[in-house]
Image (spheres, helix red, strand yellow):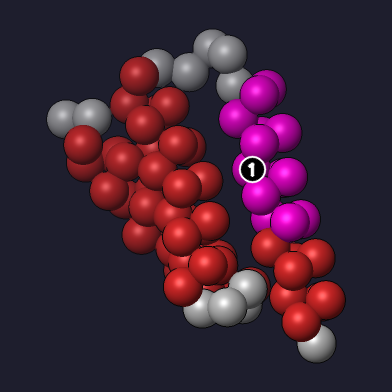
Amino acid sequence: MKTQQKFASSAVIAVMLLAMAGCSGMTQRERNTAIGAGAGAIGGSILTGGSAVGAVGGAAVGGVIGHEVGK
């Protein structure tokens, strides 16, 4: 079970990094949102012990915070 959770966390992180690498034409606010979502996914995954639900929830919260910071 732990192996699956670590794999899911790694997969989420890898997808986020690849998605951010392909977004060179973003505005500063969009970049802040993407960075916040990535950081939130990592934080949510760590806080919930590698849970995919925690990573998705963290990404949502991080994205909202990143979007609001850019205002």
Quadrant containing the N terminus is bottom right
Q: Nearer the viewer, residue 18 or 2?
A: 2
> Disc 1 designates what residue?
16
Look at the magenta stretch and give its main secondary structure: helix
- Asked if the magenta segment contains residue 67, the reply would be no
- For this rendering, which residue is in front, 25 or 3? 3
Residue depicted at 58% across the width and 13% down the height: 24
- Which image quarter holds the C terminus? top left
Secondary structure of the residue carrying numbered label 1: helix
Q: What stretch is highlighted in magenta?
A: 10-22
Residue 46 image position (x, y, % from top left): 53, 67
Judge from the rendering whether residue 60 lies leftward or rightward of residue 52; answer left or right: left
Going 31% across and 41% down the picture, which residue do you hit?
A: 66
Neighbourhood count class around disc 1 (C-alpha, 10 Å): few under 14, some 14–19, many 20 upward:
some
Q: Residue 30 location, x and y as percent?
A: 41, 28
* Left or right, 48 with reference to 30: right
Reply yes or no: does residue 13 show up in magenta.
yes
Direction bottom: furthest residue: 1
* Front-lying residue, 61 or 1: 1
